[in-house]
Image (cartoon, rainbow, N blue to C red):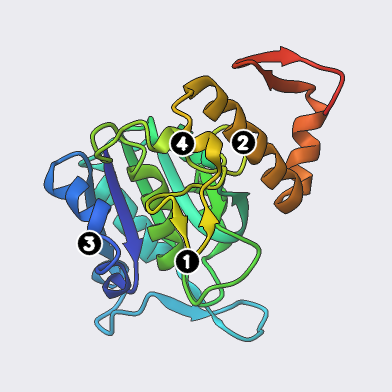
Amino acid sequence: MRIDIITCLPQLLESPFAHSILKRAREKGTVEVYMHNLRDYAVDKHKSVDDYAYGGGAGMVLMIEPIVRCMNALKEKVNYQEFIYMTPDGERLTQQLANQLSLQENLLILCGHYKGVDERVRERLITREISIGDYVLSGGELAAAVLSDAIIRLLPGVLSDETSALTDSFQDRLIAPPVYTRPANFQDIEVPPVLLSGNEKVIQEWRYQKALERTKARRPALYKELCSEFWVLSSGFWVLSSGF
């Protein structure tokens, strides 16, 4: 996979991709990540990429011309499946969306800044707008790093245990159950005996039940959505039910 990120502050993206899982994924060649400085495609010698908004109002707006220049230069080399714009009012990032994007070969991500981008960019060039939450950041760089991390860790060979990503929270639309490790007893606080039983079937049923309980308590809207679909897990199989 290849991910290209257009930004006017590429320095903000250096650290997230220089450590841990993302670093190893790049070193192994599983993913290529490139940052492109929008100011390299500026319209004047002052490297300007933003201007005042027509109609007045506070804040600057990223201009369409540098973005088009940058995108056109990249499109000459790469065939992108998605042109993504990181914005608070976009489609909410979910595990299911990360799964979908992890199946693509080439993604181009545009980071917003200031008051955003000229609306013509969103109308004519962007194929997908994504939000990581209902709040505003100083720019789209951190959001682009979050999106990239969510996608890259799903690629085959990135995680040392490839089954790990399959049990993450929201992978099956449930919050992950509690996990424990050694020691089995710490200051009289014991690990649930079922996890020490060695009975894989019983352990999986316990984990599923705990995942349901956590989802109901912490994400009631998601739990209600699952209930409305009438699907539950019984003895290791998904079956149709009248509800939880």
Q: Residue 167: x, y in percent? A: 47, 36
State whether residue 77 is above or below residue 238: below
The image quarter in which residue 163 lies: top left
Q: Which residue is mark 2?
A: 173
* Mark 2 neighbour density, 10 Å: few (under 14) some (14–19) many (20 or more): some
Q: Residue 13: x, y in percent? A: 30, 67
Q: Residue 95: x, y in percent? A: 52, 41
Tag 1 or tag 4, which sits nearer the N-term? 1
Give the Cα separation between the discs numbered 3 and 2: 29 Å
Nearest-to-viewer mark from 1 and 3: 3
Please name the amino acid that badge 3 sits on. His
Please name the amino acid that badge 2 sits on. Arg
Which numbered tag is attached to residue 94?
none
Q: Residue at x 61, y 60 (%)?
A: 133
State whether residue 23 is above or below residue 96: below
Please name the amino acid that badge 4 sits on. Leu
- In this rendering, does residue 34 appear at all? no
Q: Are marks 3 and 2 in contact (CB under 8 Å)?
A: no
Q: Residue at x 42, y 40 (%)?
A: 82
Give the Cα separation between the discs numbered 2 and 1: 29 Å
The image quarter in which residue 198 lies: top left
Q: Which residue is mark 3?
A: 19
Please name the amino acid that badge 1 sits on. Gly
Nearest-to-viewer mark from 4 and 1: 4
In front: 24, or 147? 24
Q: Are marks 2 and 1 in contact (CB under 8 Å)?
A: no
* Mark 4 neighbour density, 10 Å: few (under 14) some (14–19) many (20 or more): few
In front: 200, or 112? 200
Q: Residue at x 66, y 84 (%)?
A: 57
Q: Which residue is mark 1?
A: 112
Tag 3 or tag 1, which sits nearer the N-term? 3
Dot 4 lies on which element?
Answer: helix
